[in-house]
Image (cartoon, rainbow, N blue to C red):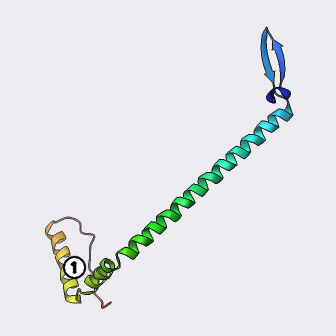
Amino acid sequence: MLSSLLETQIVIGGETVTYLDIGEGLLYALLGFIITFLGIVILIFMIWAVGKIMSKIRMQKKELQPDAKEENLTEENSLTPEIRAAIVAAIAAYYEGEKSVCEFKVKRIRRL
C-alpha cells in the first residue's frame, strides 16, 4: 500500500509500466546504500569477534601447557656448538653427495 503512493503507472501499448521519478529513484538508491553499509559493518564486526574468540582460545591453550613450552626451550638450548657444527656439516655433505646445485653454503660459524 505504501509503495503505491510513490509509483506512477503509464499504459504503453496496452501494458502497464511503472514509472520511477527522480525522488523515488533517489529513495531506492539511498536505501540500497544504507543496507550495503550496514552489511559491511556487520561483516567487519563478525570478523573482529571471531578474531577475539580465537585469540582467547590460543591464550587458554598456552596457559594450560606451560611445561611443554619450557621443555622445548631447554632442548633447543642444550645443543652445544660442536653438535650444531656437526649438523651443518652433515647437511652440507649430503648435498655434496647428491651432485646437485647446492644453495646451502656455510660461510662462518660464530658463537651465539
| Residue shown at the point (22%, 83%) measured from the top left | 84
Residue 55 lies, in percent from the top left, at 48, 67
Residue 112 placed where, x, y %? 33, 89
Residue indicated by mark 1:
88
Which quadrant would the N terminus be assigned to in this image? top right
Q: Residue furthest left?
A: 97
Position of 50 with respect to 35 (left or right) is left
Q: Is residue 12 left or right of residue 32?
A: right
Picture residue at 81% right of the left edge, 12% below the top:
12
Q: Which quadrant of the figure has residue 109?
A: bottom left
User: Looking at the image, how many numbered discs can be counted on the residues?
Assistant: 1
Q: Where is residue 16? Give x, y as percent.
A: 78, 14
> In the depicted view, which residue is nearer to us: 90 or 67?
67
Q: Is residue 97 above or below residue 39?
A: below
Would you call the spot at circle 1 few (<14 residues within 10 Å), some (14-19), or many (20 or more)? some
Image position of 38 with respect to 79: above or below: above
Q: What residue do we see at 81% from left, 38% from top?
A: 27
Q: Is residue 32 above or below residue 10?
A: below
Q: Is residue 71 above or below residue 97?
A: below
What residue type is disc 1 on?
Val
Residue 93 sits in quarter: bottom left
Q: Nearer the viewer, residue 15 or 110?
A: 15
**Residue at the outermost top position:** 14
The location of residue 77, given as percent across then percent down, is: 28, 86
Viewed as shown, does residue 91 lie left or right of 43? Answer: left
Element type at mark 1: helix
Figure quadrant of residue 80:
bottom left
